[in-house]
Image (tube, rainbow, N blue to C red):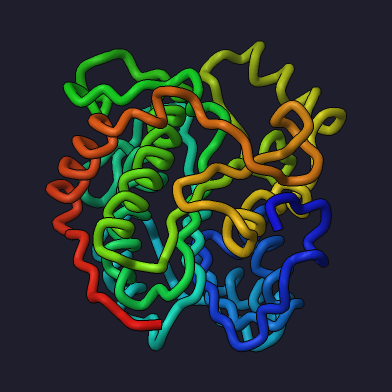
């Protein structure tokens, strides 16, 4: 399966487990519910535990909500410690966007800290429990972004919300590629994939910092965007489909909406040297390391 038009078309998931960050609403919730309806046992990582428990009951099939704040490495470690047993799918879905520069508990620029570093740390901490696939949700905004190693945290240059968001989403793809390289080198059967939802109306507001652009986006969203279920199709394809490691799944209609299919990432997301450098920096910032124990399937 390298194309997905409906969540009902994913393979049977009976006996499998999935950990999904940000699974109480939007794309994460839609993906979690689709997997649960096919038999998977799902754990969702959420900031608001009461809301997460309500979502877990709706998801069904014994879904569980655990507290996870990706803006806190302490919380990430605590969440990872609570995950017992093997995990078939780790889906790094949660995301943050801010109109002004904010920092995480650990002092990272919030969008980079949550969208990239939090998931980077979580993946390394859970790596030896994942048995099938690690899928990271990115965005088409990566195409206009670059990694500024001299100012990753936007401490010196004027803060641009959209630029910071794009940098974090480009980091997601570079992370996906480098993780796949390391898994392949280690002889692992686990694969690393990425997805982007296209234009999805999920309640997650993209803030460019330009009032006119933001207003036009809000007006156009009901006309152009698909809902959470459509936005989740690329994630489901990337996690459960017959797709190669390091690949990107997205909407097949102009990258905006429609059935999920394999799509091309920007050349900047395919730069091996940048991916390795970002990995090394991320290890230092999070104090987590790639440590893979070879397992015989």
Pick whichever, 39 or 95, lies toward us.
Answer: 39
Q: Tell how many labels.
A: 0
Q: Is residue 94 visible?
A: no
Q: Residue furthest right?
A: 223
Residue 100 place in picture, x, y as percent: 41, 27
The answer to whether 259 is drawn above or below residue 129 in the figure is above
Residue 110 place in picture, x, y as percent: 35, 40
Residue 256 place in picture, x, y as percent: 73, 31
Going by the image, does 81 lie left or right of 208?
left
Going by the image, does 293 lie left or right of 67?
left
Q: Is residue 184 visible?
A: yes
Location of the C terminus (image quadrant) = bottom left
Going by the image, does 233 lie left or right of 67?
right
Pick whichever, 92 or 47, lies toward us.
Answer: 92
**Quarter of the image where one finds residue 85:** bottom left
- Identify the residue at horizontal 27%, vertical 25% (top origin): 154
Going by the image, does 102 lie left or right of 169?
left
- Identify the residue at horizontal 23%, vertical 31% (top origin): 273
- Identify the residue at horizontal 34%, vertical 82% (top origin): 296
- Identify the residue at horizontal 39%, vertical 31% (top origin): 270
The answer to whether 81 is drawn above or below residue 166 in the figure is below
The answer to whether 258 is drawn above or below residue 120 in the figure is above
């Amino acid at each position: 399966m390298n194309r997905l038009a409906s969540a009902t078309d994913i393979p049977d998931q009976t006996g499998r487990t999935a950990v999904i960050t940000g699974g109480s609403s939007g794309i994460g919730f839609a993906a979690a519910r689709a997997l649960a309806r096919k038999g998977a046992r799902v754990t969702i990582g959420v900031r608001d535990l009461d809301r997460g428990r309500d979502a877990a009951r709706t998801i069904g099939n014994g879904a569980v909500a655990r507290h996870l704040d990706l803006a806190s490495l302490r919380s990430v470690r605590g969440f990872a410690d609570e995950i017992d047993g093997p995990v078939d799918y780790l889906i790094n879905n949660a995301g943050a966007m801010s109109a002004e520069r904010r920092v995480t508990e650990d002092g990272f620029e919030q969008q980079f800290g949550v969208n990239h570093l939090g998931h980077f740390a979580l993946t390394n901490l859970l790596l030896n429990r994942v048995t099938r696939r690690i899928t990271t949700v990115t965005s088409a905004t990566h195409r206009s972004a670059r990694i500024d190693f001299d100012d990753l945290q936007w401490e010196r240059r004027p803060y641009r919300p959209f630029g910071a968001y794009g940098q974090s989403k480009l980091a997601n793809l570079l992370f996906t590629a480098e993780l796949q390289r390391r898994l392949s080198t280690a002889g692992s059967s686990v694969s690393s994939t990425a997805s982007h939802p296209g234009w999805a109306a999920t309640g997650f507001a993209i803030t460019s910092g330009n009032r006119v652009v933001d207003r036009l986006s809000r007006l156009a969203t009901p006309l152009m965007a698909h809902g959470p279920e459509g936005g989740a199709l690329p994630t489901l394809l990337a996690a459960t489909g017959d797709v190669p490691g390091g690949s990107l799944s997205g909407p097949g209609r102009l990258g905006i909406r429609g059935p999920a299919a394999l799509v091309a990432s920007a050349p900047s997301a395919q730069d091996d040297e940048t991916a390795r450098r970002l990995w090394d920096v991320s290890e230092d910032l999070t104090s987590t390391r790639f440590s893979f124990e070879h397992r015989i399937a």
